[in-house]
Image (tube, helix red, strand yellow):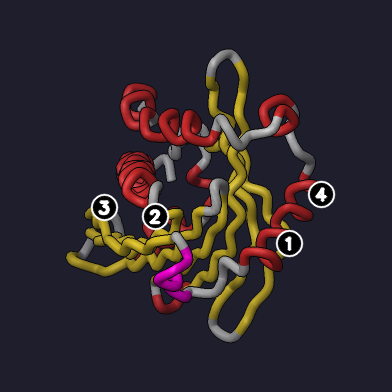
Amino acid sequence: MTKLLRVLAAPVIAMVALLAAVVTPAQAASEPSDADLAAEWWEAWNTHKFYLNIPPAPDSGKSRVTTSISIDIDAPAMRVFKAYSDMRNHIGRAAFLKRVVVHAEHKVGPARHINLTAVEEVPYEGQTVLLNTHAQQRVYKHRLYYETDTWSLPGVVTHQKIVFTKVGPHKTRVTEHLTFDADSTLIDFVVANGVASHQQTQAALKQAIESGQL
């Protein structure tokens, strides 16, 4: 597992290098409290409206790319869904993810809405850089899928739909439909690194579920 994480962590390091110019000394040196992260989450929600799945306007300077990735996991669909959809299980399996802070959780119709922030602690040039991804996850347990909208620096928005399909008595296919919105000059880099990060997490969760750790 350690070797897998080390090999697949390179894209995250590259993203940190890109963000070095926009990370403030406070972000690099101190760990925010849960209250701080909640305030950041609401600011991102209200300012950037990352829950709106609207393609960037042609003259906005932003671009959109949509793609999908899949993995087969040798376990029943509901077991895979429960383990995979719990973001706390991604800690230690997504490179540098150290904390998942839940700000609010409530039911809306068939979905469970979870407002959260994922905190990555990435070593870079002798310091630890904190990368905060603010998200809303909507979990549809009885339909075996969940959706997530996210915002993070430098102005990257994602819209995700993760679908769990039974493909055998004890085999589940997990398909992640991923949409990335970012500055047009960064979109290729953002997509390449984002997809690599999701593939890493898929592989680590597969290993954990099939081994019985989850």
Image quarter where the N terminus lies is top left
Q: Say if mark 3 contacts mark 2, CB within 8 Å.
A: no
Comes first in the chain, label 2 or label 1: 1
Q: Residues within 10 Å of mark 2 (few under 14, many from 20)?
A: some
Which numbered tag is attached to residue 184?
Answer: 2
In three-dimensional space, the C-alpha distance between marks 3 and 2, rounded to whole angstroms, equals 35 Å
In three-dimensional space, the C-alpha distance between marks 2 and 1, rounded to whole angstroms, equals 26 Å
Instruction: Locate residue 109 relative to residue 176 in the image: left or right.
Output: right
Q: Is residue 55 magenta?
A: yes
Image location (x, y in percent) of residue 65: 32, 61
Image location (x, y in percent) of residue 177: 33, 64
Mark toward the viewer: 2 or 4: 2
Comes first in the chain, label 3 or label 2: 3
Which residue is rendered at x = 57% and y = 32% of the image? Answer: 21
Residue type, mark 3 in image:
Ile
User: Which stretch did the figure color magenta?
Assistant: 54-60
Which residue is rendered at x = 59% and y = 86% of the image? Answer: 109
Mark toward the viewer: 3 or 2: 2
Which numbered tag is attached to residue 35?
Answer: 4
Which numbered tag is attached to residue 210?
Answer: none
Mark toward the viewer: 1 or 4: 1
